[in-house]
Image (cartoon, rainbow, N blue to C red):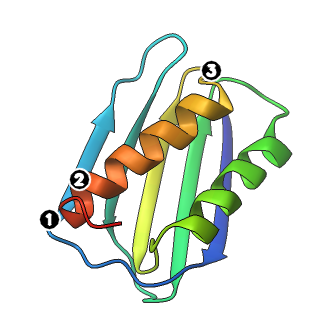
Amino acid sequence: MEKLEFRFPAQPATPAAGAALCGVVGSGNLEILIRSGDEADTCVVSVKTSARGFGRIWEAVIAEFAARHAAGGTRIAINDMGATPAVVSLRLGQALGEYTGGVQ
């Protein structure tokens, strides 16, 4: 199990829920929990993954997400079981949509 943590600047999110959970931990999938963070202009992401050695890819996928979405003021926990970058992007968008009430 590899543990990674990233911090990216992002426009502040407007939460509609205290927290949001999306996805399931299973083969080729992942679970994402989004909750309020401490810094309004920063998205903090912690990743626990079964796939070792993909830190640079995780960083690129999450950096793109933070640049495209108002995700500031969030703390995101990801539990991964080998999801592809496309699935990671999809689940991040779904979880943020649930957290913000559909406003992204």
- Residue 3 appears left or right of 39: right
Q: Position of residue 72 (x, y in %)?
A: 46, 79
- The residue singled out by tag 3 in the image is 82
Classify mark 3: helix, strand or loop. loop
Q: Quadrant of residue 19?
A: bottom left
Task: Residue at 43%, 39% (x, y): give it.
Answer: 91
Q: Find the distance from the CA under tag 2 to the CA under tag 3.
A: 23 Å
Q: Quadrant of residue 54?
A: top right
SS class of the residue under badge 1?
Answer: loop
Quadrant in the picture for the C terminus: bottom left
Residue 75 percent location from the top left of the image: 43, 66
Q: Which mark is residue 17?
A: 1
Q: Nearer the viewer, residue 12 or 2?
A: 12
Q: Which mark is first along the chain, 1 or 3?
A: 1
Apparent side of residue 50 relative to residue 37 in the rendered image (left or right): right
Q: Which residue is outermost to the bottom? A: 40
Q: CA distance from mark 3 to mark 1?
A: 28 Å
Query: Compared with residue 23, is residue 11 higher up or lower down, i.e. above or below?
Result: below
Amino acid marked by disc 2: Glu
Q: Looking at the image, do the residues carrying marks 2 and 3 touch, with CB atoms under 8 Å apart?
A: no
- Local packing at callout 1 (Cα closer than 10 Å; few below 14, some 14-19, many 20+) is few
Q: Give how far across and how far down residue 70 sits, in percent.
A: 45, 74
Marks 1/2 in contact by CB < 8 Å: the verdict is yes
Mark 2 lies on residue = 98
Q: Which amino acid type is shown beneath numbered disc 3?
A: Gly
Instruction: Check disc 2 and report its element: helix, strand or loop.
Output: helix
Q: Residue furthest top?
A: 27
Tell which of 70 and 82 is nearer to you. 70
